[in-house]
Amino acid sequence: MNVMIFALETLVMTVIFTLMILIPLSKNPVWWIHDFPKDIQEEYFKTHERIPAAPLSKPAIFKKAFAIVLVIGFMTVLVRLCGARGFRGGFLVSYAMWLIIDWYDCFILDWVFFANLKKIRLPGTEHMDRAYHQKMYHFVHSIVGMAVGLIPCLITGLVMMLIG
């Protein structure tokens, strides 16, 4: 495995991930409502029509399933370019990328940007500074993300095994 290519690919994936999150969030924060803490959602719904906001609601599942399919495709190409071969290489390299992006999401996007940028807050919840700074909420979701990441990374490993 080429570490320099791995680092460059992970950086590019991190930038793409950031854009996929922050652009829709800055244009319409409600689009990601299922990822907001419950107390923020409830405050929002006091003045707005209730929409499906559960993490396992149909809109949330659709958005995340679509993203996972894209990730499997990107990861397979990136892992191959990185020099990984077979199941073990495909899985380990893709999961390493997944973990780095997951931790970046938690510690940078959630703890810094999400907590402090009022432009990406749900309308009517701009005053809820304390609720937006819930580090444990985002940390727990990062652990869930680590577990969820096993699925696309195992599939990436299987694809790498099949293509040799």
Image (cartoon, rainbow, N blue to C red):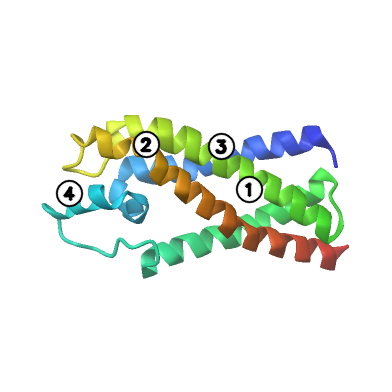
Q: Of the residues under marks 3 and 2, which one precedes in the sequence?
A: 3
- The three-letter code of the residue at mark 4 reads Glu
Q: Residue 51 location, x and y as percent?
A: 24, 63
Specify few, some or many for label 4: CA neighbours under 10 Å numbering under 14, 14-19, or 20 or more.
some
Which residue was labeled with disc 3? 15
Helix, strand or loop under label 1: helix
Residue positioned 70% across, 45% down in the render: 96
Circles 4 and 3 in contact, beta carbons < 8 Å: no
The image shows residue 69 at horizontal and vertical percentages of: 59, 62
Measuring from the top left, give residue 29's x and y in whole percent. 30, 46
Q: Secondary structure at mark 3?
A: helix
Marks 3,2: beta carbons within 8 A = no
Quarter residue 157 falls in: bottom right
Earlier along the polypeptide chain: callout 1 or callout 3?
A: 3
How packed is label 2: few (under 14 Cα within 10 Å), some, or many (20 or more)? many
Could you tell me how far apart the alpha carbons at marks 3 and 2 are, in whole angstroms? Answer: 16 Å
The structure residue drawn at horizontal position 70% and vertical position 65%, both measured from the top left corner, is: 155
- Mark 2 lies on residue: 114
- Report the amino acid beneath label 1: Trp
- Mark 1 and mark 3: Cα distance apart in space: 13 Å
Badges 1 and 3: C-beta atoms under 8 Å apart?
no
